[in-house]
Amino acid sequence: MRYFRALCLIALLAAALAWGPDNVRAATNSIQAGISGVNNATLVNGDGTGGGQIIIITVSLALVKQAYDLTGTLLPNGSDVTSGKAIYFVLHVDNTTAYPAGDIRFTDILNEAEFTYIPGSLETTVVPTGSTNAAIWNGTWTPLSDDLGTPDDIASITDSGGPPGRDRLTVGAVAGQTNKTLNIPATSLRAIRFRVRVN
Amino acid sequence: MKRKLQPITVICALALCFLLPAAQGRAAVNIGTANMGTDPTSPDNDFIKDSGTLTINSTKLAVIEKAFLDDNDGTEVTSGSTVVKGTIIKFVIYIDNTTTSQASDVRLVDLLDEVAFTYQAGSLKWNNNTTTSAAPPATIFNDTNYGVSLTDAISSTDVGSADTTQTPNDRITFGAVTDQANATMNIPAGKIAAFMFRARAN
């Protein structure tokens, strides 16, 4: 019985290793080649093996959204705050890979019945991958303009209509509100933060 | 005195044959023989002197595939690397013709897994007369990145095509490949022929 359990455990571990997490994929691309034909033993690697093959592993990045009070204390999801209190929203994407992540885009639509954007509060920082919440908060934050500009930077927040006030945040080259292209360097975490008042 | 081959000698000879690397180069020897009034004889003791020994050395060229980031910097993505999903990759395939004669009718097929990669339409390029033999990958990338664009269409007007109607793999071919024939592709002596296309890693 003990051996059976051990075997089951080994089988489960092997299966987990073989399948891997859902957001990771290993993809192979091969070239078959030859003289007056393909894969006919006239070229080295012509059968798509060795140097005629390349494996690329892809991984999904995650967008994280958090709320903080003005002193930098994390407000867990479902926290209670008083009406009229100003808080920070922080969005970040961590590029854990050794290559840049190109043309990242995200959008955040504020519900104006619940939140009022505090003008001029958009900022961004870049910190090393895997940084803790505290390290992100203590990063060097650079102000961003609210306006789209020509575009002038990687983010903007505009009024999408309805009640007056800016409520549509876009970061990167989002269609219809296109900022400068956002690329996240290898092994870096890019964060955006802005302040809102809770109505 | 005639010596008999010892079994150990035969075993050693066979082992040597297996241990030697696969033939990537070979010297082929040929002698022309002739005679008058009757067939040539061997050894050459007839009326017409045989030709001198003619040796042709054949070299097996190698095809190499590499991946680079989608910029003009030539940053290589080595095999087994991890990139972010959605990253555009420039695939570069090349053959270095190290010989002093043209390599004729070279053909290549790349079956691109449609689940893992999405071919970027109109991204085929090549060069076969710029890059000198033994150039490093960075030079090959640069020469091909700024090389001649090819159409995706299957025709004999150029040497490449991309058929994205195939499933489950898009089929990218170069040269006169059966079933997806482009113009015949030759590699000049002492040159590297290189091909490039872009695909998104899904």
Image: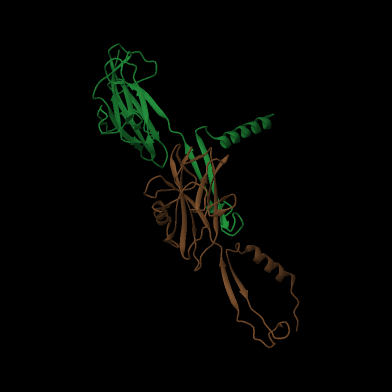
Residue B48 at x, y = what percent?
66, 86
Residue A2 visible to the viewer: yes
Q: Does residue B145 sit above or below A140 in this rendering?
A: below
| Chain in green colour | A
Q: Does residue A175 sit above or below A38 in this rendering?
A: above
Tell whether B189 sits left or right of B9. left
Task: Judge by depth and name the residue closer to the eye, A174 or A47.
Answer: A174
Residue A127 sits in quarter: top left
Which quadrant, please, contains the N terminus of chain B?
bottom right
Residue B186 at x, y = what percent?
51, 60
Task: Judge by depth and name the residue closer to the eye, B187 or A105.
Answer: B187
Tell whether B122 sits left or right of A16. left
Residue A134 visible to the viewer: no
Residue drawn at (76%, 77%), measured in percent from left and top? B4
Tell whether A20 sits left or right of A198. right
Tell whether A194 sits left or right of A130. left
Q: How many marks?
A: 0
Residue farthest to the top? A83
Chain B drawn colour: brown
Residue B177 at x, y = what percent?
57, 53
Q: Does residue B137 sit above or below B55 in this rendering?
A: above
Q: Looking at the image, what colour scheme do you see? A: by chain
Task: Judge by depth and name the residue closer to the eye, B124 or A49.
Answer: B124
Residue drawn at (60%, 81%), measured in percent from left and top? B52
Task: Judge by depth and name the residue closer to the eye, A156 or A60.
Answer: A156
Residue B77 at x, y = what percent?
44, 47
